[in-house]
Image (cartoon, grey):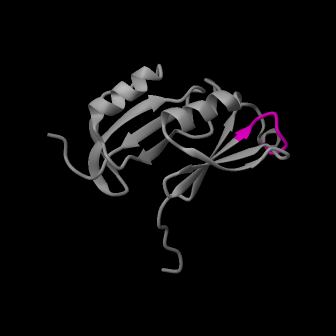
């Protein structure tokens, strides 16, 4: 096969409130800013081995994408981040302290197989799945 996919390289989210989204992804989920290109409207966050690009809808790049994301239409169904150490109680408490409600933990199938995960919503309504290592729930 001439093409073999290894992992998610990056995901691009068009955002309305860049500062709010930076707080969520950096302070709550632990990403860090890797690169900024404010002249074109691009902030790239490191999320483990992958990047999450935030593109403000009112920037040069963002205006190329049409209407802003909202309840009537989304750019992405959900994004799944693999969490190295999945302690559901600790994760839920951390999210609650940031004012973020965590969904119930369930065993779901992902790139590494079946394992625990939970869903949360970012400040602009994107669904984020936080996924632990492969292992069935007890």
Q: Check the image and name the residue furthest to the left.
A: 138
**Residue at image location 48% in from the left, 37% down from the top:** 29
Residue under the image location 76 percent in, 32 percent down: 67
| Left or right for 113, reference 69 | left
Q: Position of residue 83 (x, y in %)?
A: 38, 46
Q: Residue at x 53, y 55 (%)?
A: 50
Q: Measuring from the top left, give residue 76's x and y in whole percent.
A: 57, 40
Give, as a single range, the part of the protein colored magenta: 55-61
> Can residue 69 be seen in this snapshot?
no
Residue 55: quadrant of the picture:
top right
Q: Seen in the image, is 103 located left or right of residue 7?
A: left
Image location of residue 8, percent across then percent down = 51, 57
Counting the numbered discs, the total is 0
In the image, residue 36 above or below residue 4 = above
Quarter containing the C terminus? top left
Q: Does 53 appear above or below 97?
A: below
Residue at position x 78%, y 37% in the image:
66
Is residue 72 visible in this depiction of the protein? Answer: yes
Q: Is residue 53 left or right of residue 101?
A: right
Q: Looking at the rendering, which quadrant does residue 68 occupy?
A: top right
Q: From the viewer's perspective, tell me whether residue 101 is left or right of residue 108.
A: right
Percent x, y for residue 100? 46, 23
Q: Is 12 located above or below residue 94 in the figure? A: below
Report the front residue among 118 and 50.
Answer: 50
Q: Nearer the viewer, residue 110 or 18?
A: 18
**Is-magenta flag for residue 129?**
no
* Magenta span main SS: loop
* Residue 104, above or below 41: above
């Amino acid at each position: 096969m001439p093409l073999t996919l290894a992992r998610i390289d990056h995901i691009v989210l068009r955002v309305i409130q860049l500062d709010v989204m930076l707080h969520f992804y950096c302070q709550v989920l632990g990403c860090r800013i890797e690169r900024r290109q404010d002249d074109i409207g691009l902030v790239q966050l490191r999320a483990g081995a992958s990047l999450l690009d935030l593109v403000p809808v009112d920037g040069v790049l963002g205006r190329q994408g049409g209407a802003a994301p909202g309840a009537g239409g989304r750019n992405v169904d959900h994004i799944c981040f693999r969490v190295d150490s999945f302690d559901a109680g600790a994760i839920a408490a951390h999210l609650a302290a940031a004012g973020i409600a965590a969904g119930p933990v369930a065993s779901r199938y992902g790139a590494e197989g079946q394992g625990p995960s939970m869903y949360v919503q970012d400040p602009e309504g994107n669904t984020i799945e936080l996924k632990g290592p492969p292992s069935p729930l007890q």
